Structures are given as C-alpha cells and as structure tokens.
Image (cartoon, rainbow, N blue to C red):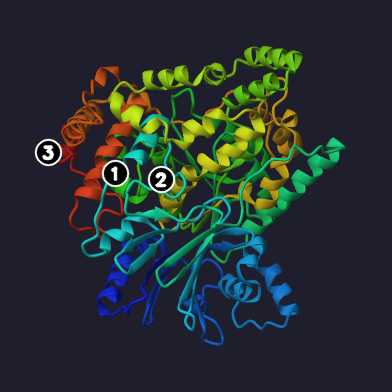
Amino acid sequence: MCGIALCYSPVRVGQNETETIRRMNALQRHRGPDDEGISVHAHCILGHVRLAIIDLTDAGHQPFVSTDGRFELVYNGEIYNYIELRYELTALGWQFHTQTDTEVLLTAWQQFGPSCLDKLNGMFAFAVYDTIENMLFFARDRFGIKPLYYTHMGHHWYFASEIKTFLAIPDFQRTLNYQALFEFLVFNRTDIGESTFLEEINRLPKGHYALLNNEELTLRQWWKPSSQNTEFQPLQSLYESIDETMTSSVALRLRSDVPMGTCLSGGLDSSIITGIVHEHHAVETDFATFTAAFPGYPFDETNYIDALNRKYHFRNIRTMPLAEKCLDNFAAFVRCQDEPTPSPSYFAQYEVMRLAREHGITVMLDGQGGDENFAGHQYMHAYHLLGLLYARRWDKAFHEGWNILRRKQEWLTWQTFLYGLLPNSLKKQSIRATRPFISADFFQHHIGLSPVYNQFLNARSLNDSIVQHFKHKLEHLLRAEDRNSMAFSIEARVPYLDYRLVELLLNIPESLKIHAGETKRLQKQALGKYTVPEILNRTDKVGFATPVREWMQTPIWQAHTQRSADFLHNRLPDVFPTIRLATLNPIDCWKLNQVAEWITIFIDEKKTDNSNLRPVVRSEAEVKIGANRPA
C-alpha cells in the first residue's frame, strides 16, 4: 500500500514540476512512511511513497525500473497472487531479482500488456511510463478498492492517490461539483463514476485502464459486474465452491511480512473471516481483532464478539468513540476522507484504525463486500419481491412477503418496495419530501442527471440490484476505508472482494441468496460453520452503527450544526434557502456538518500541509463552546 503522484506533459517538465511532485508526495506521506522516490524525465515525473508490506528491503523502492531501463512503474496496492504469477512468468523465460509483487506486476505488464489485468488477483492502482514512446499506461482494480485521480491543467496532467494531494499544485482551481453535492445530500452517495466533489478532479473509473500519449487520453473498461443467473446443482457442491474460494481468498490476503489483525463486529462478515483465519491458519492465541464498542446502547455488539471469542481464542481490543472525541477530530477526519461521509459510522472505523496502529498493526482484514456479495442489506428484500412480481410469481412473492413480516425485517424493506411500484413522477415527489432543506430548483435540476435515481433505484430484481451496488454504492465505502486506514499508515484488505468469489456469486440464482424472508442465506449455508449460533441466528442488521441521534443532540454538536447551517445558507443560498435544525434528522445534521467542513478545507483554504492529517485535540474551553467552525 502506497501513494503515487505523477506529472505528464507533451512539453518539457522541469524544476517547478519536480518541486510540485515533492509537495504532492509530502501531502500523502501517511500512505507511505517507509520510503520515498521521484524519477524525473523530460516529459514525465513519477513520485511514490511506500508502505512496506512485502519484501521490506530497499528492493521494493519505487519508481521501479525494468531491467532494460525502458519502463518505470509506480504502484499502490497488493497483487495477492504474485507468487503464482511469478511462477508463470518464470516458465516463460523471465528472471526476477527481488521478492516483491512490484517486480511481478511490471513484468506481467511487459509480457501481457493490458491483458495482464485479467490475471491480477488484488487491489491496485498503478502507472507504467514508457520512456521511449513517451506514453503512460495506468489502471485500477475491478471494484475501486485503490484510488487514482487526475486533473488536466493546460499542457500538464497530474495524477495522485488522494484528492487533497492536488492542493499542492500552484494556482490549482477548486470548484464545487454540484451534481456530486446532490448525490450526497439526497442519496448519501459519493464516488460515482469519474466525478468527484471538485469539478477539476476526475477519478479513473474502477475496472478501467487508460493510455495517455501527448494530449490524448483514452479510457477503456476492462471489467464490469454482470449476472447470468446460472443454475448450480447440487447445492452441496455450490457450498463447497464458495467455501473453497473464500478460504483461498483469506489465505492470499494473509501474505504479509508485517503484523496483521482484523476488524471485528458482531456480524456475519467479519466473524466469518476471523473464523477462517483460526480454522485454516496457525495463528497465535493473541491474534489481534479490533472493535468499536458502544456500551449501554442496544446496537452494541460486544456480546456477540464474546460468544465468538469462546470458540476462537483471540485478543479483542476495543475503542469507544464518543461525541466529544468525534468533534475534536472532525476537521482531521474530513481532511483525511477527501470527500464527505454520510454517517458517523465512518468515524468509528477511523477510530478502529487508529487503535490498530497504536498496537503495532500494519495490515488489517475487513468484511467489506459481504453485504453486496450475499445480499445482506435488508432493503434488498424489496428488489427480490419486485423481481418475483415482474416474473409473475405471485405465490412466491406472497410467501416471501409474509416471511419478511414474520422475521420483523426493517421497515425500509417496504418503503423500498412501495417506491419501486410508483410512477416516475411520484418517485421524484417521494424523494423530494425527504430532503426539505434543499431548494426545489436544485432538486429538479439535478435529479434527472442522477445515476442513483436513474439506475440504482430502478433495479428490477435482486441480482440486478446487486450489480447496481457494485456499480454505484460499494466504491464510496471502499474509499472511506482506504482513507481511514491509510490515515494511520495501515493497509486494509477485503477478502470478500476476491474477483473469483464475486463472479461466482453474481451468477447464482437470487432465490438462493434470499429465501423465506432471510438475507444472506447462501452465506450462512456455505460459511456459517466459521462463526457461532448467536451470530448465525440473528435477524437484525446493525452495520457498524453509532449513536448518531445522541451525538447530534449534545450541546456541542447542536452548536456546531447551527454554525454549519448558517455557513451553508450564506455560502450556497441557491442550495440551502432555509435550514431549520428542528426539522432535520440526525444523519442530515451530520451531512451538513460534513459539507461545511469540506468546503472550508478543500475550497477555502489557500495553503495546505500535513498538520491536520493526524488527529488533534482541542482545549476543554473549545470543547465546551464547540468551536470548530470559521465565522
């Protein structure tokens, strides 16, 4: 896991651009505290900061140069199957001089060109510079686990791993992207397609590669999610395939030369990962797991973790995020995230990563992707029901509906189901009614342009909805995890997003994923042996919950939210004509605070440095008055 920064131009680059890349490297040094490298050419400057994970020697220094000197690579991520790929390349006549996956990646690109991407099992964003042809090739992994952004200024192209890095570019213009703001305020979404919260910065889309030659940038999609509904028989064979693929995924992601741990909640996804680690690998009894705990709240999951700990003897280390601590670190958290986050759950994850770093952990496993793969979101019941209705399977739809009621699933299921039956005009009205604090003109102008409105919410079946989750939802969760972990120089790995598992599950009939009102049925059947009955038999869905209502009702947060509301009304009156805090739900309060802080940091600040990348603690007097907002 690392950070990359590049400058490319068809005209010559020089000392000014080199200094810019040095500053960009400095702004993302938290991504790579172990080493730094810069390589300067007539038309391209490559910068890199390294977090050493595999082969901790200087052999992993980047930019990494091919043996013939023609190609240079800068790379962020991990190629988990680098050992197997190395054997394949060795058989083709290639020789290796390091034990790094970096050398394997560059060699694979030399051998196979863009087709090498199909062979990579991992998370990655990388660029290869051809010093003879003066051409850049860059690519991202299938799901967008690892980030890569770019901007075009005159004859210069800049690339980096984080948005904040671009603030080091002299005279860099920063303009709020109002469509991105709309998606966030209305649908709780960021990281959609190429757009970011800044008009000037684009994201290389997940599953894409690009070629940059002189002034011409060409993007091509090399992977996309799709569902074929292939029939699998017998079921036991399917369960074994899922088990084998998942355990293989975990095994690959345990390849590391540095200390490892895992995030652990009381849910299926993370508990199964912990179980696989203990069942299939010789780990110590003090294998570290890390949890955000909320004692006294109904959604606290530590009793489920205790049950799992009675089966597998691991060390569970807990952090207890508080409203005051969240406000103390709010500016640092927003800066670290690059774009706003839709709930305090992301701050809880931030605190988990901080805790892991304090205990010497450099690599963390996490359960992200389990809900998408196995239909774990309770509102997915709605898309299953809609699919049954569209297929005219009335009896099946009735029985599923009855079982949803019997199992007391979330009311959001029925809201989503009823929404799917509405005509488009009423759909817009129903969405508008939930966001009274934004102007009608702003809503009407942007709703028709929204991929979430046009595609995500119009899924016509469960498997269609799962595909839409991979297209339009998962990436903002992955971005938040990347920034939270890298803020503390930690690499986060997500075993549920092994492409072999994703492609296997995308093509399984949806009737095996949700059955008799039960989500994640397939996961429970195939992998339930790795957890405990107390978790396996849960009918609720918590999902990294935080006491957002209680937090937003504290005096310090109420004062902070009022300042944020005033700031936004004055700054963006066409979006926020009036903001009445008494009418806002707690999540909307959080979001308004996020947007106000983001504008302050990413648009208003004239200079930026590393000072706010790490958490800061304000004085007791400041905490009491809630001071954290510029006038």
State which tag comes first along the sequence, 1 or 2.
1
Residue 76 seen in this snapshot: no
State which tag comes first along the sequence, 1 or 3.
1
Which element is circle 2 on?
helix
Query: Mark 1 sits on what residue?
Result: 329
Q: Nearer the viewer, residue 338 or 408?
A: 338
- Which numbered marker is on residue 350? 2
Asked whether the residues under the numbered discs 1 and 2 touch, taking CB atoms below 8 Å apart as contact, a structural biologist would say: yes
Amino acid type of disc 3? Answer: Ala
The quadrant of the rendering that contains the C terminus is top left
Which element is circle 1 on?
loop
For mark 3, does the 10 Å Cα neighbourhood hold few (<14), some (14 to 19), or many (20 or more) residues?
few
Residue at horizontal 60 percent and vertical 67 percent from the top: 114
- Which numbered marker is on residue 631? 3
State which tag comes first along the sequence, 2 or 3.
2
Nearer the viewer's eye, disc 2 or disc 3?
A: 3
Residue 550 shown left or right of residue 300 in the figure: left
The alpha-carbon separation of the residues under discs 1 and 3 comes to 19 Å
Asked whether the residues under the numbered discs 1 and 3 touch, taking CB atoms below 8 Å apart as contact, a structural biologist would say: no
Amino acid type of disc 2? Answer: Tyr
Q: Is residue 615 above or below residue 464?
A: below
